[in-house]
Amino acid sequence: MKNSGKTGADTTAFGRNAFRLFRQAIFRGLACAFGHPFQFPSGPLAVIAPHPDDEVFGAGGLVALAVAQGLPVHVMFLTDGGGSHEGCCNLSEQEVGRERCELSVEAARILGYSASAIHYFRRKDGAVPIPGESGFDDLAIEMADKLREIKPAAILAPHPFEGWKDHAAAEHLARAAIAKLDNPIRLIHYCVWFWLSMPLIKVFRSDWRRACVLEIADVYDHKMQAMSAYLHFKASCGNPWIGRLPLFLLKALEWKKELYFESNCNR
């Protein structure tokens, strides 16, 4: 009976993993079939990231290529990611957040932009406000003020179907901040948890004609090194400061391309 149970568990795990690979293959196939090559912005790039690591996992290749082309890059972190060890160990959110912010500086060095181009908004991890919640309008105003300083030609924000609350909030905040600006700004969605969390039923709600595929072979090693900075530095509990991430998410992010979607609300 024990052997039968183990075999059943192994079969379930195999089926789940096969489904995840199938999902990733579908997404990549749709993007390549119906999408188009990524068009670089003509000026500065601003990346809105819910936590330190999203800027690398979702857009590290684009950031490295933008830097190589001489485009200024700014990264706006809404939280310090201090909640990544909740339920794991006794590390405080303050300590975890501090270490993740230090890792963001190392990732910036690897990708080629200055630590002075990193902007921290210090909201609580897991509690970035969504529309209708207290603090949403204040944070949108704060972000809009920073965007006026940066004057980006394009803003990157998480895809609306990312699944996690802070990621969804970041997308809503990007739209709200853009709405407060006077000049049109291109809004582009990047993909992190999209690869693993988006329900397949929503695949057909995505406009794949707006998909943009970016070849990152020339800077792939830089992205992998920046990812490694986040993944390999570990806390005293033995887990990475950013927490343990699903293997199949990391495999999806090791693609030598990056997937983006042009927003349908660009102003």
Image (cartoon, grey):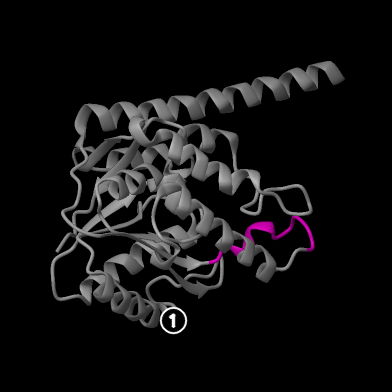
Magenta residues span 80-90
Q: Main secondary structure of the magenta part?
A: loop
Q: Which residue is painted at 28% across and 48% down in the image?
A: 66
Name the spot of residue 16 as percent of width and height, x first.
57, 28
- Kind of residue at badge 1: Gly
Name the spot of residue 96 as percent of width and height, x first.
66, 63
| Quadrant of residue 23 within the rendered picture | top left
Residue 1 visible in the shown view:
no
Q: Nearer the viewer, residue 226 or 169?
A: 226
Secondary structure of the residue carrying numbered label 1? loop
Q: Nearer the viewer, residue 83 or 45?
A: 45
Name the spot of residue 73 as percent of width and height, x first.
32, 58
Q: Is residue 98 left or right of residue 196?
A: right
Query: 161 above or below 7?
Result: below
Residue 39 included in the magenta stretch of the image: no
Q: Which residue is painted at 29% across and 38% down in the image?
A: 204
Q: Which residue is painted at 32% across and 45% down in the image?
A: 62
Q: Give the residue pinned by disc 1.
A: 135
Q: Residues within 10 Å of mark 1 (few under 14, many from 20)?
A: few
Q: Is residue 213 left or right of residue 12?
A: left
Q: Which residue is painted at 72% across and 25% down in the image?
A: 9
